[in-house]
Image (cartoon, coloured by chain):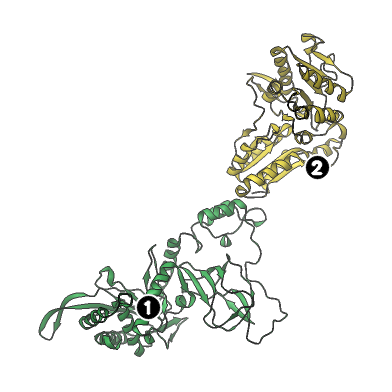
Chain colours: A green, B yellow
Amino acid sequence: MIEFRLPSLGADMDEGKLLEWKVKPGDQVKRGDIVAVVDTSKAAVEVEIWQEGTVHELLAAPGGTFRVGAVLARLLAPGEKPGAAPAAPAVPAERRKVSPAARKRAEELGVSLEAVPGTGPGGAVTVEDVEKARGRGPEEKDKAAGMRKAIAAAMSRSKREVPHYYLSETIPMRRASEWLTRENARRPMASRLLMAALQLKAVALALGDFPDLNGTWREGVYRPSSAVHLGVAISLRGGGLVAPAIHDAGRLALDELMKRLADLVQRARAGSLRSSEMSDPTITVSNLGDTGVEATFPVIYPPQAAIVGFGRVAPRPWAEGETLRVAPTVVASLAADHRASDGHRGALFLAALARRLQEPETL
Amino acid sequence: MASATYREALRQGLYDAFERDERVFLMGEDVGAYGGSYAVSKGLLEKYGPERVRDTPLSELGFVGAGIGAALGGLKPIVEIMTVNFSLLALDQIVNTAAMLRHMSGGQFSVPLVIRTSSGAGRQLAAQHSQAFEAWYAHVPGLKVVAAATLDDARGMVNAALAQSDPVVIFEYPALFEMKGELGDAPVDLSSSVKRREGSRVTLVTYGACLPKTLAAAEEVDGEVIDLRSLRPLDLQPVLASVRKTRRAVVVDEGWRSGSLAAEVLARIAEQAFYDLDAPPARVCREEVPIPYARHLEEAALPQAEKIVAAAKALF
């Protein structure tokens, strides 16, 4: 029997609300299939399964809020016959007692009832309980406030636990800009590339030689990742941000990377990300170039061990030998976890990134 | 405003009616020479004479029928049935004749009959003299049924009833006869229920003799008290408005629980204020036994303030 548990969809996630099952008992599933939609404090996330099997029973009812790690469903492994052992249902199995007025009030306030303790007759949730519970927990309908809290938790943890070091480098972008202009001139509008895609690809490729920047730090141990799952910080219209992953970004052709980036931004803003996109980033890129800032000094998103920032690509004075000229440049920065790497490695990485961006045709 | 008892208020109501309209007369057992079994009509015979204050034989079916005939003939009869216990003997006239005649005559006749009767337990009169059958009458279309729980209603209801063109049954409460208070003379609206106390935590709905007990209980639980007053038709608007505020309801009813007025009120709260409820609505009713004679057992069988408090607290 395979247990399908609620995965952590980010370091700041303690629990999630099951919105919908995408499978039913009897369905065959394989690696990467989307089986459920879970609401985290950040987004409605499509949760994938990483095992193969047949859905045996769904233990969790949509609408319920569950701790990370709670068993949501059981699956039969290929060839397995259903056993006699009855499954213990995931909490909450019992129907909560909620007064009709409390239910109505909860709806009005956008409070999820599963997390509200009941103090009424027989432990029923009353209007008073709902009103007390208002404004706390990830169940708020006020997504922005919920997300703010999640970001606050993750960033506080980062600044509390992660010893950051910061480096920055001004990178000439003339070649990259010219190449991009040429490339886009011959492309139809729909498949034009953004400088951001170029930068992402350059970061992913440059990281190949720096496993100490691309990985996760968990419980005192750093684990480098063999693939570069590039988290892309995306600001949301309602406030807040998410940083879902573009998987294996180093191996994607630029066109494909551009497509994934556009898709990711669109889905992030629509609130329909996948579980692996939320949980897998091994490093994040924060590009604030379009806001016009010179440089960014970003905060690492645990358990990742580094984050790369880009400012605006703009014409600036640039010295070449004895000559001063005006050329497009960008300030790339790196914040990295000093437990996993040292400044020397970070400096080499930024140099490698700068080199990559001088050879846009190889990206 | 003058100080008076509930009994005096009832008597004052009769005097008001006799003064107001010469067609008004009172008929019933011992209402004349004896001054009324509960001394409500004391002095009436002396003042208005035997034409208008008529003693009857012990024949409820007969004298209620006579009252119906008088009403059809253009008089304004007030028929006193000593207690609701004996009114069962007159049910056929009340239900099959008084209540149905407008319908059966295709609207040609109406029966402007006023029946006064007393109801309730609490005076050690034993099972056969302690019934509370308000719900039986409130079940019947064609009747208007009201319950006087205050001095002002005790005085004003009979006059308001006499102004109706259809039969009205007024319930009076011997348990309240010695209740003292200020007596006003404002007209009474027979069609509306009344809020008797402001409160915020629970709505306590009652009528008749349970009102003082309910008001006492309300002091302890911050209850909002609604006196139904009109038992048919029911005016639930003040009840529903109150339940929407307090989100909790206890109905206090001296009748037996099964098939009671409390059951009807609860059903309507559930139908019309379901989404406003924060706890299942509750009831405090008469225990489903014949009322015992022994005082402590009688008290135990009836709604009491402590039971109402307990029922309300169970909803918090």
Query: How far from the left and from the top, in percent, is residue B275?
Result: 61, 49
Q: Which mark is residue B287?
A: 2
> Circle 1 sits on which residue?
A259
Query: How far from the left and from the top, in percent, is residue B185?
Result: 64, 19
Question: Regarding mark 1 in the picture, which secondary structure is present there?
Answer: helix
Quadrant of the rendered image containing residue B34: top right
Q: Residues within 10 Å of mark 2 (few under 14, many from 20)?
A: some
Amino acid type of the residue that numbered disc 1 sits on in the rendered structure: Lys
Amino acid type of the residue that numbered disc 2 sits on in the rendered structure: Glu
Query: How far from the left and from the top, in percent, is residue A187?
Result: 29, 79
Question: Regarding mark 2 in the picture, which secondary structure is present there?
Answer: loop
The chain containing the residue under callout 2 comes to B
In this view, the residue in front, B237 or B208, is B237
Residue A262 appears anywhere in the view:
yes
* Quarter of the rendering occupied by the N terminus of chain B: top right
Q: Is residue B130 left or right of residue B282?
A: right
